């Protein structure tokens, strides 16, 4: 919706926003002292810890959204991009330097050649993903945030709840239940922690039974329960009873058994753990076939294939290149996204997965 720049409320909000931006400008540099590599390492540590302790199994987009912009005469400002609207990406620089985002005394320093598409690469948004909460520099390097522990998890939980309601409201009358189930399936299968997701949904159902989800009614100037909210709550409750929540194998690899086992994903998960000094993740001739069978790969060659992938990902001189180029670009990115979600309980391996995933998104 277009802004009415002349409306008194709009001018008031803009002035308040600029004042707030000016006050924030001098708080960020203290958190951004250090080399790019040091800052990125700290950001990865923060995110890994937040996901492990405070994010209940949500599927989060890897597309950069929050860009930290350096300003004249000093300070920085964080601007949120339209990460889920690809048709706007080509004009993203104009939006990034829009004075709307900055205080009256702040001037953004953005190179004329800067392009949001360079940060995004060939990625496309998934419609059920939550927005990426990480901070990025103009060059696409990760930066640490100043949020206290747990705050990002709470923000993502609020975004998840709101998107679930939006999915329900936007769906056609006879497709509402199916859309809600598809949304929940997406997060269960891609969020990496289905048990925590189930816990969050149980709490949400309990809350909605007492106070149904609401929406703003412009005519009443107040909130009111969304139409047919009982169907939404019932569908979530039914899904919790019917959908399998446990997707971990007997060895705790966190990889679901299925008809087409992904041996390369399993090899990557084990490789990233092994490379970060978790020797229990080693795959050898002695255990390869057993691990493959636990995943659901019952063929006689499955153990050998798993071991071959693991060896290429860890022991070869070009092991990193093997990990980053083993398939079409989008296939490799999806493999790393899945690996990251399966490594939440292994902070060092998770950080390595996120670092290499960022390299994939930055590469052309």
Image (cartoon, helix red, strand yellow):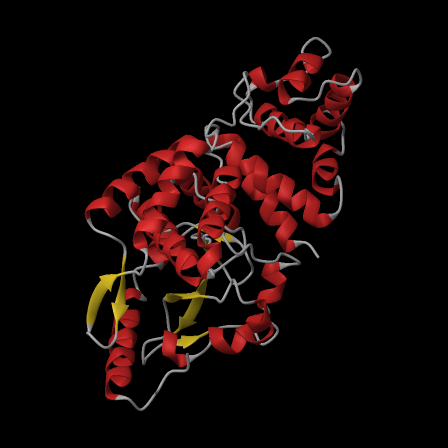
- Given the current orientation, which residue lies at the most extreme bottom position? 6
Q: Residue at x 51, y 51 (%)?
A: 61
Above or below, 347 relative to 216: above
Q: Looking at the picture, how far across and down is residue 95, in whole percent?
A: 48, 76
Point 31% across, 37% down: residue = 202
174, 99: nearer the viewer: 174
Q: Quarter-wise, where is residue 364 in the image?
A: bottom right
Left or right: 104, with 240 as reference point: left
Q: Measured from the top left, where is residue 114 in percent x and y?
A: 58, 70
Q: Quadrant of the N terminus?
A: bottom left
User: Horizontal and vertical percent for residue 343?
Assistant: 51, 31
Q: Specify the quadrant of the image occupied by residue 199.
A: top left
As drawn, the residue found furthest toward the front would be 174
Please, is residue 166 above or below residue 101 in the view? above
Quadrant of the rendered image containing residue 168: bottom left
Q: Nearer the viewer, residue 262 or 99?
A: 262
Q: Is residue 98 visible?
A: yes
Residue at figure coordinates x 38%, y 74% from the top left: 101
- On the rendered structure, is 117 left or right of 219? right
Residue 316: % across, % down: 76, 27
């Amino acid at each position: 919706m277009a802004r009415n720049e002349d409306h008194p409320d709009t001018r008031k909000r803009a002035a308040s926003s600029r004042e707030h931006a000016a006050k924030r400008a001098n708080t960020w540099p203290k958190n951004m002292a250090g080399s790019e590599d040091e800052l990125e390492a700290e950001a990865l540590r923060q995110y890994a810890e937040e996901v492990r302790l405070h994010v209940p199994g949500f599927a989060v987009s890897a597309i950069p959204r929050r860009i930290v912009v350096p300003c004249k005469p000093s300070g920085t400002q964080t601007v949120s991009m339209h990460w889920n609207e690809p048709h706007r990406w080509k004009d993203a620089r104009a939006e990034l330097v829009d004075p709307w985002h900055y205080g009256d005394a702040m001037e953004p320093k953005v190179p004329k050649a800067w392009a949001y598409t360079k940060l995004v690469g060939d990625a496309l948004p998934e419609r059920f993903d939550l927005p990426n909460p990480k901070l990025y520099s103009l060059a696409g390097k990760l930066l640490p945030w100043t949020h206290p522990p747990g705050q990002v998890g709470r923000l993502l939980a609020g975004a998840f709840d709101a998107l679930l309601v939006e999915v329900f409201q936007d769906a056609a009358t006879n497709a509402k239940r199916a859309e809600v189930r598809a949304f929940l399936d997406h997060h269960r299968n891609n969020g990496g922690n289905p048990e925590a997701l189930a816990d969050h949904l149980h709490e949400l159902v309990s809350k909605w039974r007492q106070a149904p989800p609401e929406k703003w009614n412009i005519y009443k100037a107040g909130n009111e329960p969304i139409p047919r909210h009982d169907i939404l709550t019932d569908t979530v409750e039914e899904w919790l009873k019917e959908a399998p929540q446990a997707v971990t194998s007997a060895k705790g690899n966190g990889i679901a058994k299925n008809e087409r086992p992904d041996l390369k994903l399993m090899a990557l998960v084990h490789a990233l753990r092994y490379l970060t000094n978790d020797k229990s993740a080693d795959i050898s001739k002695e255990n390869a076939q057993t691990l493959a069978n636990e995943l659901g790969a019952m063929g006689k060659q499955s153990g050998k294939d798993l071991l071959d992938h693991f060896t290429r990902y860890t022991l070869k001189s070009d092991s990193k290149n093997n990990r980053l180029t083993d398939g079409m670009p989008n296939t490799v990115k999806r493999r790393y996204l899945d690996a990251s979600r399966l490594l939440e309980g292994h902070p060092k391996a998770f950080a390595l997965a996120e670092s290499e995933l960022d390299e994939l998104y930055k590469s052309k």
